Image (cartoon, grey):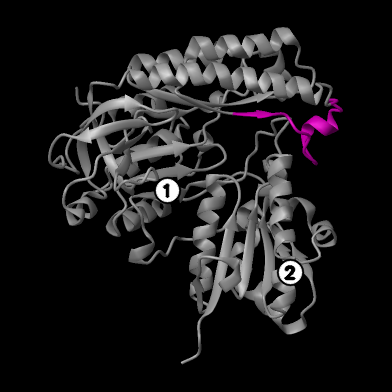
């Protein structure tokens, strides 16, 4: 029998990239490729890139550079660069990365077999960055094998973005917004659940603007959540990323009302200053954002919140930065993702001639202030669980070692807890919802101990809150 070719994919960036990698693996498997654990073993190496920040772009170029000697020693090995940097840079990337054989953007993933054949036939380097028109775009259906599916799964519901926030490159690299048909989304969720997934995260650049159903009030995303919630066997439902201007009351109500809806909301604010938000072209004020959070927390008091913060945006004054600090103190997020602003090509900020005028050392100092404040807040927020028993969806072995297991609360907090005496029982707990008593906190996680048997779930019953037990 012909020996299977091997592929190694190194991924950078967001959950959309994670989903894209899974689809690439499935496409290549149909072409006779088997996934392997390192570039040294591979006949094909794909670097799936992210362009959202300059640092992410540098990472993929560095990874390609480290493969130079390996590629010279193995002339038959093919190196491709995929993702948003490939889309952004096109043929320019081939000049900067001489080890790359070809590059391709996100819309070209379905064409990967033909791209490989094109390179194999001519051994000529090329870049494939055509964007598929909205009217012609078709989403790839996930085709996982049983062993591919973990306790948690990603399901894409849209691609692209029509918002054009001034700092963001996504509309350029991912194209116009396209929403996936609801029946496809529900069928894919059911397919993952049938193969063992218990939690699904619906992903897109702006899930709140999902518009493929045609509800009378236009709140298609809330209706999609309701339809996915009805999938038998699904235990938990999450979604990301949300744009605050499109976050509706009905979606907030879904956290209170739906059987599987988790108590976690990621709502990126980016800045606490209305003046900065206006320059970012975000479409909401600080006050409007806070009102939406207040409403969501009133409906779901146990809601855990996370957000994104950019410091050092063009023109950000000390007073505007202080407004971001005051917002963090007022909201008390459970977790944040924070970054210093970096110019990205083809963004509205450059077209608007917003000068990157905050010195690097000031950005670094502001970022350290934000992260120091958030560490204090995170510690307080995690501390509220100590002494309580909570429902944990077990994901597998803990990275902390010592035979521990790990899983998450409904609010997305990671819990590491003690091993059962019997290793086979530990394996049997994966995918189960179990009661864990929280005994301590770490910097970003919780520590607990198993207190009882797995919780029997009436998976198609009326609403049942999968939250803190006591």
Residue lying at 29% horizontally and 56% vertically, measured from the top left = 196
Left or right relative to 364: residue 288: left
Crowd class of label 1 (few under 14; some 14 to 19; many from 20; radius 10 Å): many
Q: State the residue in front, 237 or 229.
A: 237
Residue 436 pos. (x, y %): 22, 33
Is residue 132 visible in the rendered image? The answer is no
In the image, residue 391 sits, relative to residue 317, either above or below, namely below
Distance from the alpha carbon under mark 1 to that under mark 2: 47 Å
Residue drawn at 66 percent across, 45 percent down: 176
Q: Quadrant of residue 108?
A: bottom right
Which residue is denoted by mark 1 in the rendering? 182
Residue drawn where x is 15% and y is 39% of the image: 455
Q: Which of 167 and 227 is in front in this view?
A: 167
Segment colored magenta: 338-355
Q: Does the magenta stretch include residue 342?
A: yes
**Label drawn at residue 69:** 2
């Amino acid at each position: 029998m012909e020996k299977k070719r091997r592929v190694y994919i190194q991924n950078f960036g967001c959950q959309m990239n994670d989903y894209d990698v899974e689809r690439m693996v499935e496409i290549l498997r149909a072409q006779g490729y088997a996934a392997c654990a390192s570039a040294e073993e591979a006949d094909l190496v794909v670097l799936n890139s992210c362009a959202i920040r300059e640092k992410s772009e540098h990472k993929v170029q560095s990874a390609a550079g480290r493969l130079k000697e390996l590629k010279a020693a193995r002339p038959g090995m093919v190196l491709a660069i995929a993702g948003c940097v490939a889309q952004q840079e096109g043929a320019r990337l081939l000049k900067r990365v001489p080890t790359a054989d070809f590059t391709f953007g996100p819309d070209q993933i379905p064409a990967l077999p033909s791209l490989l054949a094109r390179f194999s036939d001519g051994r000529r380097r090329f870049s494939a960055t055509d964007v598929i028109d909205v009217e012609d775009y078709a989403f790839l259906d996930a085709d996982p094998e049983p062993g591919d599916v973990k306790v948690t799964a990603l399901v894409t519901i849209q691609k692209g973005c029509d918002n054009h926030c001034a700092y963001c490159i996504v509309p350029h690299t991912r194209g116009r917004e396209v929403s996936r048909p609801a029946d496809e989304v529900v069928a894919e969720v059911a397919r993952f659940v049938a193969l063992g997934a218990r939690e699904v995260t619906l992903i897109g650049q702006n899930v709140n603007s999902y518009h493929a159903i045609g509800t009378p009030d236009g709140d298609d995303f809330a209706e999609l959540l309701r339809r996915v919630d009805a999938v038998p066997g699904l235990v938990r439902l999450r979604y990301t990323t949300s744009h605050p201007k499109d976050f509706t009351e009905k979606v907030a109500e879904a956290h209170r009302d739906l059987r599987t809806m988790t108590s976690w909301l990621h709502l990126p604010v980016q800045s606490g200053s209305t003046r900065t938000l206006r320059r970012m072209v975000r479409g909401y004020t600080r006050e409007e954002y806070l009102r939406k959070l207040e409403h969501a927390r009133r409906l779901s008091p146990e809601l855990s919140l996370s957000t994104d913060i950019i410091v050092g945006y063009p023109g950000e004054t000390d007073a505007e930065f202080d407004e971001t600090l005051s917002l963090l103190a007022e909201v008390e997020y459970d977790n944040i993702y924070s970054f210093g602003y970096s110019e990205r090509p083809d963004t509205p900020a450059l077209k608007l001639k917003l000068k990157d005028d905050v010195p690097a050392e000031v950005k670094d100092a502001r970022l350290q202030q934000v992260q120091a404040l958030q560490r204090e807040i995170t510690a307080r927020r995690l501390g509220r669980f100590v002494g309580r028993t909570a429902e944990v969806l077990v994901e597998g072995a803990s990275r902390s070692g010592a035979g521990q297991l790990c899983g998450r609360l409904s609010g997305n907090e990671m819990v590491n807890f003690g091993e059962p005496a019997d290793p086979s029982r530990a394996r049997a707990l994966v995918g189960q919802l179990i009661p864990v008593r929280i005994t301590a906190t770490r910097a970003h996680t919780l520590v607990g101990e198993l207190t009882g048997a797995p919780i029997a779930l009436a998976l198609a019953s009326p609403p049942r809150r999968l939250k803190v037990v006591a």
